[in-house]
Image: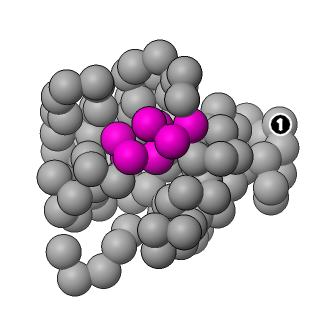
Amino acid sequence: MSSKPKILADENIPRTTIRSLRSSGYDVVSVWEVKPGISDEQVVQLSIREKRIIITFDKDFGRIALTNPGIPGVMLMRFLPVDPEYIANRIISALEAVGDPYGKLVVVRRRTVRIIPLR
């Protein structure tokens, strides 16, 4: 992969996870840092404006990704968010496995990564 994708972390992504992603060289903007409490639609607009992949535990973004053609991409975490370091490692390994997450809905479980093209 030539360059790492830019990430928009939804409010449900732990701060420790965000710090780990940043220390691994990812450009991460967190919803709780820029505009806590914004709606899903506002998260999508921020993602589109800044060309960032949304990383979230919120299943609604799976549906939103499939119905909003402008969205850069969504990585949907589908496991219990128990350990922030595990979450960071799972995100990084999934991003490495996918290569280019733009234009995709990436569903990440404990043992699998499913890729659904958005366009």
- Tell me what residue is drawn at x 35 percent, y 73 percent: 4
Image coords of residue 12 (percent x, y): 65, 32
Identify residue type, mark 1. Gly
Residue ID at (83%, 44%): 36
Q: Residue furthest top?
A: 80
**Above-or-below relation of 68 to 97:** above
Measuring from the top left, give residue 119's x and y in whole percent.
Answer: 20, 50
- Say which element carries label 1: loop
Magenta residues, start to end: 84-91
Q: Looking at the image, which is closer to me, 16 or 98?
A: 16
Res 102 → quadrant: bottom left
Q: Position of residue 70 (x, y in %)?
A: 41, 55
Quarter where residue 39 is shown: top right
Residue under circle 1?
A: 37
Horizontal side of 114 relative to 85 (left or right) equals left
Query: Residue 60, can we see it?
Result: no
x and y percent of residue 46 in the render?
63, 58
Residue ID at (61%, 53%): 18
x 56%, y 67%: residue: 22
Outermost bottom residue: 2
Examine the rendered structure and indicate whether residue 99 appears above or below residue 63. below
Residue 52 can be seen in this image: yes
Q: Which colouring convention does the figure follow?
A: one colour
Left-right relation of 32 to 43: right
Q: Main secondary structure of the magenta part?
A: helix
Vertically, is 113 above or below 73? above
User: Horizontally, is 68 left or right of 17 in the view?
Assistant: left
